[in-house]
Amino acid sequence: MMKQTALPLPRRVVLRGLTAGAALLTAPGIVGRARAQAGDAIRLGAPFHRTGIGASYGRWYERTANAALKVINDRGGINGLPVELIVEDDGTDPKRGVEVIEKFATEYKVDAVFGHLFSHVVAACAPRVGELKMPYFLCSEGHALAAGSFNRYCFQPSITDVKSQIRSMGPWIAANLGKKVALVYPDYAFGYDHRDNMTAAIEAQGGKIVASIAIPPTETSFTRYLPRIPFDTEVIYHVMVGPSVLTFVKELGEHLGSKRPEIFGFIDSLEAVDMNQPQLAFLEGTYFWEAMPRYAQPDQTDFDKFYRAQIGIDENGAAVGDRKDVSTYSHMFCVWETLFAMKQAMEMADYRGPAQKIAMLEAMESITGFAESNEFPQGAKIFNGRTHQSFGHQYVSKFEGGRLNVLHKTSIEDTFYPDETDYTKMSF
């Protein structure tokens, strides 16, 4: 899917800030000895998708977390304590994900866990973190948390959920592209969020879903699904994930030819893919949702510049010096921002260990939002402490000349929906 330029790492990686910005790889035995020194550091478990269908995301999530951790430790850590990152590969697999959560709790005894993306893994892990009473900070986009399906230990402070994204995108699609919409989405929880919420959004605008096509995320060829798109379709709405997203987009173009309907995709379909290539020329003039614009825009903020520089990303969203090593730019900011959100809550609670766990979680619930800054470069957010969910800006971008140019930025208010739960009424 993309060129792998990162050096292979051991399965367990510990990045320690014992000196300014220091990073070291530690064997499991040394991890155990370090853990025995209570209060000497804050330890965060990171179950990243190093393998499986989420591998491209996991690699960039890990790279982003390392960069954010360096900034935090260079500034003195959290409450004067260095912060360690302990990484385990969950294989983008629900069963393995739960095993890793248990390992973080029982073997590493981490202070909190963060970084899960794929919603089927999140759905499996959330009940277990509640049983283990482990603070769990999601870097996903599923709506299950805000819908009340999880527990008081689960938070999503730095990325919006699918429901809020579509609530702001649906009216724009209906008003600008068409009202007869064919949905193409992955056949698991994340895809169902898109199906259900986009159906509701289009119907609310007087439109109609003319096809609803679910595709297994492990599929490698899509030609047998595409004929199900009706001839009277005005808009094809696509969101695909996994290692074959480029194949999906290429085969979609071959199937449609030059006389195609409007196309609106979520950038998930092309995350980590170099868009400036001949195979994607048919996407010229199509539209995408982005959470954070991959390509630096004319009004690029200093915060975005800082963020790119710390991770090593150029103005096209690729690794500096390798334009083919394309980042998962529209999602990985969540890892960066979540670390700073956790830091804020821990500092509010003067967190130094498990004795301050509940105080830290209550501090997180009391936060009402985050200002756009180096710590929150994607933009300002409103955080709902009752539902544990953040709300932020969304972007509509148009594919032009091999890059994405932002056409429309929603307000945060466009993404609001009524509360569906109140976690503060649950016990810890």
Image: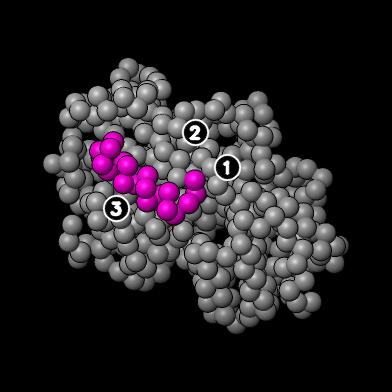
**Within 10 angstroms of label 3, few (less than 14), some, or many (20 or more) residues?**
many
Q: Position of residue 190 (x, y in %)?
A: 51, 62
* Residue type indicated by callout 3: Val
Kindly identify which residue carries mark 2.
63
Left or right: residue 210 versus residue 47 is: right
Magenta stretch, main secondary structure class: helix
Task: Look at 41% across and 31% down and name the residue there.
Answer: 12
* Residue type indicated by callout 2: Arg
Q: Is residue 390 visible?
A: no
Q: Quadrant of residue 327?
A: top right
Kindly identify which residue carries mark 3.
129
Which stretch did the figure color magenta?
91-109
Mark 1 or mark 2, which is nearer to you? Answer: 1
* Residue type indicated by callout 1: Ser
Query: Which sits earlier in the primary sequence, circle 3 or circle 2?
Result: 2
| Front position in the image: 395 or 222 | 222
Callouts 1 and 2 close, C-beta under 8 Å:
no
**Within 10 angstroms of label 1, few (less than 14), some, or many (20 or more) residues?**
many
Between the C-alphas of marks 1 and 2, the distance is 11 Å
Left or right: residue 355 versus residue 93 is: left
Q: Circle 2 — which element?
A: helix
- Magenta stretch: includes residue 98: yes
